[in-house]
Image (cartoon, rainbow, N blue to C red):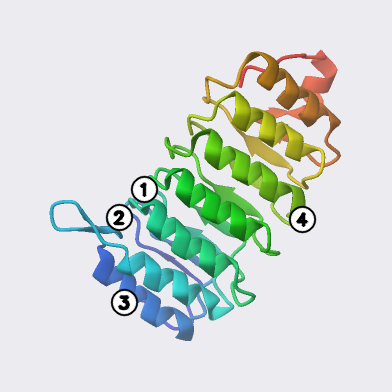
Amino acid sequence: GMKQDQTEASFYDQGLKPADAILIASDLPSMALTSLDLSSNRLCTEGHGTYEPSGIQALASALGNKVLTHLNLFNNNIGPEGAKALADALKSDMAVLTSLNLEMNYIGFEGAKALAASLAVNRVLNKLVLSYNYSLRDEGAIALGEALKSNKTLKELELRDCFIGAEGGKALAAALGIAVLKNLNVSHNLQIKGEAAQQLSAAALGSASLEVLSKVPIKEIREDKHTELRL
């Protein structure tokens, strides 16, 4: 259970299921909670692996509580439907979430596109972690790149190991000149190479805001005069 005045709660790896997420969601509006870690649970899985989004949908609806700023949903089989529910919540003026971790959640390019659409209007989120969503691919990266051109608050975007290729890499490169990102991680997307990798490196060097690209400080890239990064 959670106390009304506690500000942080971790339920890491507790075997929580959709019904537990619904319970937590119903508690959120009356809580002072600013940080909630629900990583490595089964929030969207019933029985022997049936996908069930009702828990994540309830949690998403509860994000309008005007208090919760950090939500970690790493490894919960959120899926595209769950990502869409969270994206809808991020569009609301009531949501004050500054950090959202959706790493390893099978959100697919559909989920990434929904989140991208919310980034185009959201004015609060600082950090979004989407690494290890293997089917995010170019389509997801292109949508995120477009959204970054109009978003003025996102500072960190993690897209490690998302099977992003040349087109996605180029779309992200095009966004870097306009976006306010400080940290972009596209490491282990092995198809971002050659021309796409060069465009990303050049865009990173030309960015007024970017400080780190794929864990390499821009300062180091400048000093070494790298033309191509090992992404």
Task: Quote the CA–CA distance across marks 1 and 3.
Answer: 20 Å
* Res. 1 in view: no
Q: Amino acid at mark 3?
A: Leu
Observer-side mark, 4 or 1, equals 4
Which residue lies at the image location 54% right of the left edge and 50% below the top edge? 113
- Residue 212, compared with residue 84, is above or below; it is above
Q: Secondary structure at mark 4?
A: loop
> According to the image, label 3 marks what residue?
23
Mark 1 vs 2, N-terminal side: 2
The span from disc 1 to disc 2 (Cα, nearest Å) is: 7 Å
The local crowd at label 4, few if under 14, some if 14 to 19, many if 20 or more residues have their Cα within 10 Å, is many
Q: Which is in the foreground here, disc 2 or disc 4?
A: 4
Whichever of labels 3 and 4 marks the residue nearer the N terminus, that label is 3
1 or 3: tag closer to the N-terminus: 3
Q: Dot 1 surroundings within 10 Å: few (below 14), some, or many (20 or more)?
A: many
Q: Which residue is mark 1?
A: 75
The quadrant of the picture occupied by the C terminus is top right
Residue of label 4: 152
Toward which corner of the image does residue 23 lie, by quadrant? bottom left
Neighbor class of circle 2 (other Cα within 10 Å; few <14, some 14-19, many 20+) is many
What amino acid is labelled 2 in the image?
Answer: Asn
Mark 3 or 4, closer to the camera: 4
Give the camera-side residue of 6 and 50.
Answer: 50
Q: Are marks 1 and 2 in contact (CB under 8 Å)?
A: yes
> Does residue 101 lie above or below 124 as drawn?
above
- Cα distance between the residues tagged 2 and 4: 32 Å
Indicate which disc residue 41 carries. 2
User: Which residue is drawn at the image coordinates 75% and 35% (left, top)?
Assistant: 174
Whole-number angstrom distance, CA of label 3 to CA of label 2? 15 Å
Q: Is residue 145 visible?
A: yes
Residue 211 left/right relative to 44: right
Report the side of 67 relative to 226 (left or right). left
